[in-house]
Image (tube, rainbow, N blue to C red):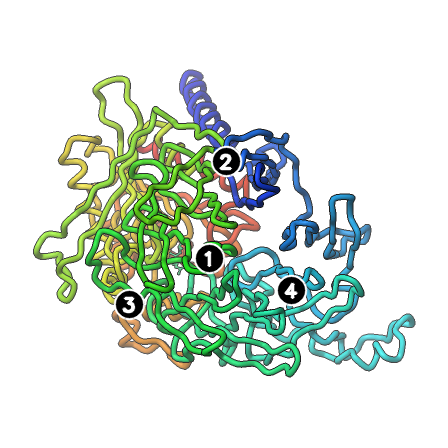
Amino acid sequence: MPLLAVYTELKKVEEIVGVYRDLASISLPTSAQVRSVDDQFLAVTTQWSQRDLEKSEKTNFTVNYILNAQDYSVLIKTPSQEVKNEIWKKESPSGKYHAVVTSWKNKKGEEKQFIEIWNSQGKIKNYDVCSQEKHGKVNNKDDTFGCLQWSNNEEKLLYTSERKLPKTKSFFGTTNGNDDKKEEKDIVLGKEHYTVEDWGEQLVKKSCSVICILDIKSGTIEVLDTPADLSCGQACWGPEDNTVVFTGWNNDPFRLGLKYCTQRQSAVYTYDLKTQKITSISDKTQSSRSPNISPDQSKLVYFDQPIGGAHKQCSRLKMYDFKTQTNQVILDIVHRPKDEVCNGIYEDVLMSRCWSHDSKQIILSTSYRSRTVLYCINVETKTVRQLNGGIKDGSSSIVDIYKDIIIISCTSPNTPQHLMVGKLLSNPGEEIKWHYLNQPEIDNNISFHLSSHQPTTDRKHSKYGYLDYETILVLPKTTDDKKPPLILFPHGGPHTTFDTLYMMYVAGFCKCGFAVLMVNYRGSLGFGQDSVESILGNIGDQDVKDCKAAADEIISKGLVDGQKVFMFGGSHGGFLTTHLIGQYPDFFQAGCCRNPVTNLTVMTGVTDIPDWVYVESGFDYNHSCLLNPSYSEEMWKRSPIRYVDQVKAPLLLMIGKDDLRVPPSQAKEYYRALKTRNIKTRLIEYEDNCHPIVKVDSEADAFVNIMLWYKEHS
Ligand SMILES: CC(=O)N[C@@H](C)C(=O)N[C@@H](C)C(=O)O
């Protein structure tokens, strides 16, 4: 390479790395808890996360605020305090104590887990919970199984862990001299290689979760006697701490991946702590989750949706009354949106605190077209209203509510998430006055525009012809008349959505000079259940054409350079990337995808969600389904690899080597197909990454490689 070219190349790399470094240094709030100290003061604890590129890890820290309880002005803000080894922290109802679950490696490198109890003087108890050998590893803070709940009398803690498995050793193992007789008896022979099923992608080694109660005074642990065919989670205390309410996922006949899949068979149960009786309180024909008890303990709300079908869908909000032992629907599934207020609920879980103080209203946030908006739902009148708050056309979500003081997180594509505080008002007509906890850092070099798109007559859905869809165009500020090149970016799923959030990669692409068009094609969440269903059996066609038509529309408006269009997407977004470069070979300069689905016919046997392949291809699924030639034929017709002969655009493929959702073989097969056809391609494999590729160093490396690939092929 001539010296000048080497220098130019290095400069390019330096600039991209510089952009990434700046963005990676932004810290973002992850959670917050508000508490009233007295009539004059409010205390807010906030948790934050920031990428540390030098250490290749995420740094977590807390910042505490004391606010004036009248006008919410910040009186004191403590310096940031780094948090290490902490899995979970929960304040007791009175605020006197904190329970902290910590994880720590001893000198032998073995992982130890503790539950620590703190008061204002320091640590008052520390329990090595696994050493009692009552259960396996304690679950971490995930939305599926994890929970940590104080009893109302502050004497007990509810948490979940893996069920204890018998110890096993080889048929040929010699007895260890230190084993006492009892331990010998408990050891089973020759089962160390038996498969232990788990719940798949991002839930590896989560096999059968059980509910545990720690008695804080004595340190004794009780593991609730729940059936072995249920994996239990999302537990909370029932009225007067006499029962435990939880979600149970059915293991039978085998587990399918749970991540991004709320359609799995699950129900809400109560466990009577005196009689040990388990009762299902939700409709057995539905998939129910996320029970949440009212402050007056008279009722609980939860979500449900049909079992099976699309991996994420519109859910109902239901309420169970403990006294009458009856259920009612508070907010139903919205098939076809009919007002400007709510298009239905699309969340996995409710926030752990979501009730108003009078136990009459629920605060939640969910997608409304391409924005996350705040809702207040009155459970008595069943009325829904949107709450004001946040940036125009941006997104706001609930972070915490306590005694009607609400913390929200506000954001938009040019404004990183920041926290605001306000008070829920009794008069629904009055607007909430929001106050900043931290000031947002708006990037004035980036702008964004929401557009709705009407499919042309030939593209209208035969049953749901009224459906439209949306895009979010994110534009860099340009100093000359040159139009920016365009990155067309459809989301994965396909049943997820792009809300008007700040996304580091999108902001980074803009800062490197690209416009980004994020497409919420028909099938995305937030547009009603009809939209979700419209794509089943239409993947590879309806979604592909929606993306192409949206790009054409934006180009025709003269906002971007139509001669320089690039594709980007992960997973189902990678499926769309490979489809689009195959179906429209002259339209794209280059493409890049993360863990793409490229060949549906060979995916059913290797993914943790074979049902996804059947359902999205237009078939019903049950656990005994076997792939046959007629399924395969349809799956082939819908697969991007079918068009590989037509591809012209150079393609960068990135895989997480531990991906269980879309196994690396999907990208590898496509890579080989391109190579033999002399199409320029590169495959990057990230160790220790699964489906999302979000390890700090890998995410950073991927960003620079994507930008270099696009620049090289501009
Ligand atoms: C349900 C699911 O995981 N589908 C994948 C094929 C997918 O597209 N995943 C999305 C959520 C992603 O962006 O990774």
Can residue 483 be seen at all in this image of the molecule?
yes
Q: Disc 4 and disc 1: Cα gap in Å? A: 25 Å
Q: Nearer the viewer, mark 4 or mark 1?
A: 1
Question: Which label sits on residue 358?
Answer: 1
Name the residue rendered at 46%, 67% in the picture.
289
Q: Residues within 10 Å of mark 1 (few under 14, many from 20)?
A: few
| Residue position marked by numbered label 4 in the rendering | 158
Point out the quarter of the image occupied by ligand 1: bottom left
Q: Quadrant of the N terminus?
A: top left
The residue shown at (68%, 68%) is 213
Quadrant containing the C terminus is top left
CB contact under 8 Å: marks 3 and 4: no
Measured as percent of width and height from the top left, residue 509 is found at 37, 33
* Amino acid type shown at disc 3: Ser
Q: Amino acid at mark 1?
A: Asp
* Label 1: which secondary element: loop
Task: Estimate how packed mark 4 is, as few (under 14), some (14 to 19) or many (20 or more) residues with alpha carbons within 10 Å.
Answer: many
Q: Which residue is mark 3?
A: 617
Type of the residue with mark 2: Gln
Residue located beneath label 2 in the image: 70
For image coordinates 65% across by 49% down, the residue present is 95
Q: Secondary structure at mark 2?
A: loop
Q: Closer to the observer: label 2 or label 3?
A: 2
Residue 557 in the figure: left or right of residue 342: left
Quick check: marks 1 and 3 in contact, CB under 8 Å? no
Q: Residue at x 78, y 45 (%)?
A: 122
Looking at the image, do the residues carrying marks 4 and 1 touch, with CB atoms under 8 Å apart? no
> In which quarter of the view is residue 704 placed?
top left
